[in-house]
Image: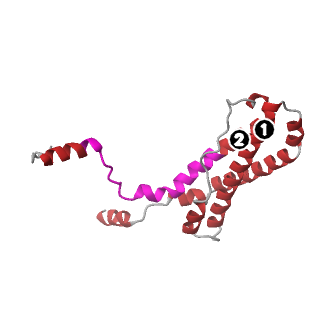
Amino acid sequence: MNDKRKVRATEAPVAFGAKLADSDSFKTLFRDGMALVEEAADYLDGDGRDEAKDLPRVASLAYATESMRLTTRLMQMASWLLLQRAVNEGEMTPEQAGQEKNKVRLHGLSSAKDGPGWEELPSRLRDLIERSLHLQKRIRHLDEVIYNKAVESEEPAVVSNPVSDQIGMIANAFAVKAD
């Protein structure tokens, strides 16, 4: 029994993020992401362009802003998905992808759902925006699991406590041992 414990203690932990990134779940996420990029592009170049022509001035400005945010958000997510697929297929190392990933912005670019003109936007555009925000949330979660996993396994950082620091300085000043 002791021998089994020794073997288990020396085994490396499973890299959950790497396994998840190369799973059927990632493949589904990749397919969903690329399909949404294509659907949004088709809409914005076709029906969306026609629908935008009939919008009042405030809604027209909201349409221009939100379609730009949508496009940018989708391009950033597609870049991340393509980087991760390159790692999964052995075209890049995780370290190379990590360096390139720093150029990808998965945070920000939210949409002003309560802003002027939002309710007047075509329902299909609002649906694409909602779906892109949901996809962005899924990708950010996977990104954190993959790339921050190494941070979690390291020794925890010592965080300075300003109050304790001040008490320590006072104790040193009066040469009193702090508890």
Q: Quadrant of residue 84?
A: bottom right
Residue at horizontal 57%, vertical 56%? 20
Circle 2 residues within 10 Å: few <14, some 14–19, many ≥20: some
Query: Which residue is label 2 attached to?
Result: 131
Instruction: State which tag comes first along the sequence, 2 or 1.
Output: 1
Q: Nearer the viewer, residue 124 or 56?
A: 56
Q: Secondary structure at mark 2?
A: helix
Give coordinates of residue 34: x percent, y percent: 74, 53
Q: How is the image coloured?
A: secondary structure
x, y percent for residue 5? 33, 62
Q: Which residue is mark 1?
A: 63
Question: Magenta stretch?
Answer: 136-164
The reply to whether residue 121 is visible in this rendering is: no
| Image x and y of residue 160, in percent | 31, 49
Q: Amino acid at mark 2?
A: Arg
- Is 94 located above or below residue 66 in the figure? below
User: For residue 3, which numbered disc appears in the image?
Assistant: none
Q: Amino acid at mark 1?
A: Tyr
> Does residue 38 appear in the picture of this structure?
yes
From the top left corner, tell me how far across and down residue 59 is, in percent: 79, 32
